[in-house]
Image: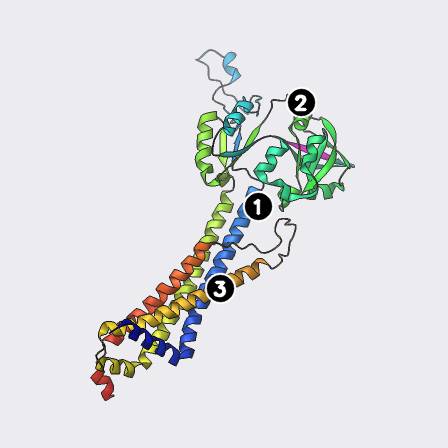
Amino acid sequence: MALPVNLEIAKTHLLSRKKQSIVAMLGVTFGIAMFILMISFMKGVNKFLQDTMLASTADIKIYNDVKTDFSSSVTADYFQDSSQLVVVRHQKPKNVNLNIKSADQIIADLKDNPKVLAVSPMLSSQVFFNYGPVQLNGIIKGVNILEEIRIFDLKDKIVSGRLENLLTSDNGIVMGVGLAKKLHVSMGDMVTLASPTGNSMRLRVVGTFQMGMAMVDDVNSYVNIATVQQILGKDNSYITTINVKLKDLNFASAEAISCEKKYGYKAESWEVTNASVQTSNVVRDVLTIVVSATMLIVAGFGIYNIMNMLITNKMKDIAILKAQGFAQKDIIQIFLTQSIIIGLLGAIAGLLLGFLLSYGLSRVPFPSQGMVSLKTFPVIFEIKYYVFGVLFGVITTLVAGLMPSIKASKIDPVAILRG
């Protein structure tokens, strides 16, 4: 039979049972819409957590990982008689410098690497902030603030003042909001801090920042590298850490291994530093896929049920069609066409509903608890999820309609017409 005739019959069947057709389409629509909403939201949450993690973690961190080596001892200089057994208890490690030698050359070489976007030297130290009779623990990070901004995108985290104020102030400090609140200081106030070696210094607050993590905001501060070198009594070449930002952070592990071999210092990728966060992201991804797939499969069984009932109710029509000369392939074509139409219309409606729900969620204000960068719920809009939704909707309805269609095509019209 001609295809237009089969299409006309399929159309007539769909319109004659409008409620069943609409219910079948709604099964596809809501299944795809919920899939898009859930996966867009969960992927958005994972991206937000990763961005928050990377806000305080470099793609690669190069530092001098000092390991205590007790294989040799100064006792060998005093007891050279090999016949004697000398036992040394409670060995003390020798004094070692934590700085990276030839740091300037390493930084210059990293900047020449086409995969590297930015390089920032850093020198950090634990300090004590004087607050009346009490001393509060803190960490000051001596940085090249312009490079640090490129690596951690700090401008979005500023609450008051400007990071660039460090460039025009020899004794400036940009503090975490939690630490500033503990010290009861604000822009322009002076703070006194002391290093573990006893050196003290007075600095002026030129800005405050908020990462959204108490472990950072209540402890960390930024100053110029020269300030930390001065308080530690070190020269201007003393640097303990080099932070690296890559153009593509997916190459972090491979580049970290390469840097470690090339420079002889410990190179740690962001994946190693934040292994627990990565694990939780994987768990959430798997959970999202399992729940989304379950919803789509349930929707597929619902479509199969409806298509099976639809064909059962059309048994007499099928018998008449076969009696008029319609072949098995025509019967299959008629009901498969219905399935495809239901799948396409349901998938398109599902994409639209899923997008509207996702967009609506992305505009809902987030009940912020110190999260400066998070104003609304995190949602990601990626075309691949919508393409997958359409494909799944069409394929599911196609499979759901195939088995009942084959069953209908094998019906003996004489037996049906006799009742």
The first of marks 2 and 3 along the sequence is 2
In the image, 338 versus 208, the foreground residue is 338
Disc 3 to disc 1: CB gap under 8 Å: no
Asked if residue 2 lies in the magenta stretch, the reply is no
Q: Is residue 143 left or right of residue 181?
A: left
Which residue type carries mark 1? Thr
Q: CA distance from mark 2 to mark 3?
A: 64 Å
Q: CA distance from mark 3 to mark 1?
A: 31 Å
Residue 39: x percent and y percent? 48, 57
Residue 209's place in the image compared with 387, above or below, is above
Q: Helix or strand or loop: what does disc 1 sit on?
A: helix
Neighbours of disc 2 within 10 Å: few (<14), some (14-19), many (20+): few
Residue 83 in the image: state x and y as whole percent.
Answer: 43, 13
User: Looking at the rendering, in which quadrant would you find the N terminus?
Assistant: bottom left
Residue type, label 3: Leu
Q: Residue at x 24, y 71 (%)?
A: 329
Q: Is residue 404 visible?
A: no
User: Residue 272, how many percent across, how many down?
Assistant: 49, 39
**Quarter of the image holding residue 312?**
bottom left
* Residue sitting nearer the eye, 195 or 175: 175
N-term mark: 3 or 1:
1
302 vs 354, left or right, is: left
Would residue 112 be seen by someone viewing this image from the given angle?
yes
Query: Which circle, 2 or 3, is nearer the viewer?
Result: 3
Q: Which residue is mark 3?
A: 352
Q: Identify the element where label 2 is drawn.
A: loop
What residue is shown with label 1?
52
Q: Residue 233, which numbered label?
A: 2
Looking at the image, residue 9 lies above or below residue 223: below
Q: Earlier in the sequence, mark 1 or mark 2?
A: 1
Magenta-tinted stretch: 124-129
